[in-house]
Structure formats: C-alpha cells, structure tokens
Image: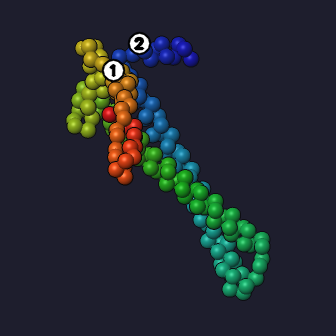
Amino acid sequence: MHEDYEQLLKLTPEEMAVQILEKRRLLADQISFIIQGLEESVDQLQQKYDKITPKYRKNLDEKKNDSKTITEFETIRKELKEEKTQLDAAIRISKESDDAVAYWTRRVERGTGELDYDHPDLLRFSKAVSTGKMSRIGIKHQNKKSFERSPKIFTCCKKSWIILWRYN
C-alpha cells in the first residue's frame, strides 16, 4: 500500500490525469453491465407484478383477506420499487461517469491549465505556494486565529448593562 502512494507521488499531473481517465473509463464500462442487469431484473419483477395485480385487485373487490396473495403482491411491489430506484441511480451515475470521462479526456488533451471559467487551473494552489504565497490550509488556519472575542456593550432599561460577546 505504501508503495502505491510513493508511485502516485512520482507521477506528473499529466500522468495523473491519464490514470484518472483510465479509471473513469473502466467505471463507465462496468456501469453499463450493472444497468443491463438491473433492467433485466426490473422486467422480470414487472412481469410478476402484472401477473399478480389482477388477483390482488380481485381480493380487494371481494373483500377477501387472502394473506398469501396480499403478502406476495406487497413483496413484489416493494422489490420492484427498490430495483427501479437502483436502476435510476445507476443511470444517473452512468451520466455522471460519462461527464467525468469527457472532462478528463479534455484534461489529458489540453493539460492541467485553465480550460474555461468553470474549469480553472488544477495546479493554481500549488503554483501559489511555490511563488511564496500561503497555502489554502494556512489561510484557513490564519482566518480562524483572526476571530478574536471582543465585548459589545448594550444599554437596557436605562440602568442595566448587558455585555454580549461577538466575533470580529
């Protein structure tokens, strides 16, 4: 595991972008198989649901309490709902994965610099630190220290004084 980190630290930003792109493409390929399996599962459950629905409605119309049919219907309905939710999530992830592949393809082709307003330079913070500016973590730490407590005094009812503490 430690060797993996050392190898990652030796990569240039361009090589890292290529590695990220390869991983994203692999994920995109796997998602398509997951979606296909979920679609088949949803189709099978939909067929079961369509088959048992008339029995369930007949029981409701006749006011029978056939617990086996009701239980089976509720189980299939619940499974179908869960499978459809998973399918929707997989489709959303697939779309996001396609967007990520497109982004990292652009990064590999055009480099780590600023692409446009929405895609700034990936190394902007590294460049700032190398020119002597403070890192993002240093700035956050410095901002936390600058919040000092100071009293704010208010008058209330002409004779009483209330002291409230606030952060500057």
Element on which disc 2 rests: helix
- Give the foreground label among 1 and 2: 1
The x and y percentages for residue 156 are 36, 50
Nearest to the observer: residue 121 or residue 35 = 121
Residue depicted at 26% across the width and 31% down the height? 120
**Marks 1 and 2, how far apart at CA:** 21 Å
Element on which disc 1 rests: loop
Residue 147 vertical placement versus 37 (above, below) = above
Viewed as shown, does residue 72 lie left or right of 163?
Answer: right
Viewed as shown, does residue 149 lie left or right of 43?
Answer: left
Residue type at mark 1?
A: Ser
Residue 95 appears in the rendering: yes
Residue depicted at 34% across the width and 50% down the height? 158
Quarter of the image where one finds residue 47:
bottom right
Residue 45 vertical placement versus 121 (above, below) = below
Give the mark, 1 or 2, whose residue is nearer the N terminus. Answer: 2
* Residue labelled with disc 1: 135
Residue 14 appears in the rendering: no
Nearest to the observer: residue 162 or residue 100 = 162
Residue depicted at 27% across the width and 24% down the height? 124
Quarter of the image where one finds residue 25:
top left
Q: Which label number is shown at residue 107?
A: none
* Residue labelled with disc 2: 10
Rate crowding at label 2 as few (under 14), some (14 to 19) or many (20 or more) other CA atoms within 10 Å.
Answer: few
Residue 89 vertical placement versus 45 (above, below) = above
Find the residue positioned furthest to the bottom. 62
Residue depicted at 22% across the width and 37% down the height? 117
The x and y percentages for residue 53 are 64, 74
Image quarter (top left, top right, bottom left or bottom right) of the N terminus: top right
Quarter of the image where one finds residue 68:
bottom right
Rate crowding at label 1 as few (under 14), some (14 to 19) or many (20 or more) other CA atoms within 10 Å.
Answer: some
Viewed as shown, does residue 120 lie left or right of 101?
Answer: left
